[in-house]
Amino acid sequence: MPKMKSHSGTKKRFRLTGTGKLVRGKAYKSHILTKKTTKRKRGFRQETTVSSADRKTVVSRLA
């Protein structure tokens, strides 16, 4: 039986921290930026952790 392959899109979008948390980039930062405040756009630059509800799905695609 061949091994399962990791999902290529998931590999590019998520990463594991040293403590085992999943990190992702934020959405809504690519276009239609003129109506968004500078403070809001600056917040999109930071990464955030994946919610516990989505963690199982993402981990299954990474492994």
Image (cartoon, rainbow, N blue to C red):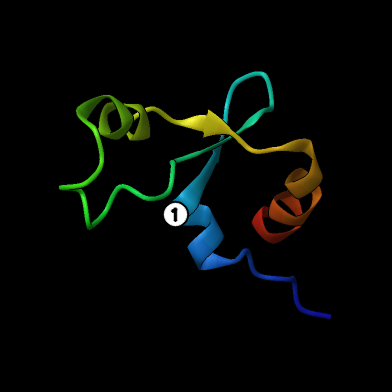
Residue situated furthest right in the rendering: 1
In the displayed structure image, the side of residue 36 where residue 19 appears, left or right: right
Residue at 27% x, 27% y is: 42
Q: Residue 59, image x and y in percent?
A: 72, 49
- Quarter-of-image position of residue 7: bottom right
Q: Provide the secondary structure element on which disc 1 rests.
A: helix
Which sits in the foreground, 11 or 47? Answer: 47
Q: Residue 18, image x and y in percent?
A: 60, 20
**How many discs appear?**
1
For label 1, the residue is 12
Which sits in the foreground, 6 or 1? Answer: 6
- Neighbour class for label 1 at 10 Å: few (<14), some, many (≥20)? few
- Quarter-of-image position of residue 37: top left
Residue at 27% x, 24% y is: 39
Q: Amino acid at mark 1?
A: Lys
Q: Is 5 located above or below residue 40 in the figure?
A: below
Which sits in the foreground, 1 or 42? Answer: 42
Residue situated furthest bottom in the rendering: 1
Q: Is 55 located above or below residue 8 in the figure?
A: above
Q: Residue 47, image x and y in percent?
A: 44, 31
In the displayed structure image, the side of residue 19 where residue 57 appears, left or right: right
Residue at 22% x, 56% y is: 32
Residue at 38% x, 27% y is: 46
Residue situated furthest front in the rendering: 35
The quadrant of the image that shows the C terminus is bottom right
In the displayed structure image, the side of residue 25 where residue 38 appears, left or right: left
Q: Residue 25, image x and y in percent?
A: 44, 41
